Amino acid sequence: MNKVYSLGYGGWSNLKEFVGFLKSLGIDILVDVRRFPTSRNPEFKRENLEAELYKHGIRYECVSEGLGGYRKGGYQKHVETEAYWEGIRRLTKLAEDGNVAIMCLERSHKYCHRKFIAETLSEMGIEVIHIEA
């Protein structure tokens, strides 16, 4: 299984530069783990992000249902749900198809729900590389 990259788009104001960065990492599939895949920056709204990634040969997948943040009772409690584990299964299946990056807004995984996803993947023996660009 391939490694999984983890990054936030916060700090990137230009979608084309962000996509170029993903290309430089060899990302084949960007997995959006935002609970609500929208943004104050219109370039990073789901439909615009998906369209731009497609132009550059990067597949876009949204797993907000299972892995998105902002959960009632906190994300740590959400980790115990079947919805979370279904999201993890979907993510690991995608990682079998190519180089995957999980993406949210927060630049640092330390302040983002991606840290829980990364812990789960690490416990499963999957290497997680955190990018804070």
Image (tube, helix red, strand yellow):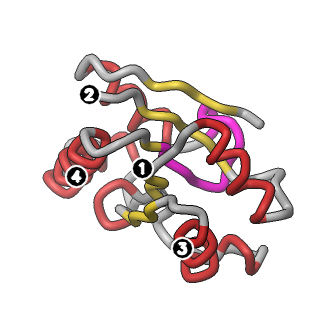
Q: What is the distance, in whole Å, between disc 4 and disc 3 at their CAs?
A: 18 Å
The tag earlier along the polypeptide, 2 or 1, is: 2
Name the quarter where the N terminus is drawn: top left
Residue topped by disc 4: 90
Tag 2–tag 4 contact (CB < 8 Å): no
Q: Which residue is located at x 40 percent, y 20 percent?
A: 127
Q: What is the distance, in whole Å, between disc 1 and disc 4 at their CAs?
A: 22 Å
Q: Is residue 105 magenta?
A: yes
The tag earlier along the polypeptide, 1 or 4, is: 1
Q: Which amino acid does label 4 sit on?
A: Arg
Per the image, label 1 sits on a secondary structure element best described as loop
Tag 2–tag 3 contact (CB < 8 Å): no
Q: Residue 1 carries which label?
A: 2
Q: Which residue is located at x 72 percent, y 52 percent?
A: 20
Q: How many marks?
A: 4
Q: Give the range drawn in magenta.
A: 101-111
Residue 12 location, quadrant:
bottom right
Residue topped by disc 1: 74
The tag earlier along the polypeptide, 2 or 3, is: 2
Q: Which mark is residue 50?
A: 3
Q: Which residue is located at x 67 percent, y 39 percent?
A: 24
Q: Which residue is located at x 34 percent, y 29 percent?
A: 2
Q: Which amino acid does label 1 sit on?
A: Gly
The percent position of residue 122, horizontal first and vertical second, equals 34, 21
Mark 2 against mark 4, which lies toward the viewer? 2
Q: Does the magenta stretch include residue 34?
A: no
Mark 4 against mark 3, which lies toward the viewer? 3
Name the quarter where the C terminus is drawn: top right
Per the image, label 3 sits on a secondary structure element best described as helix
The tag earlier along the polypeptide, 1 or 3, is: 3
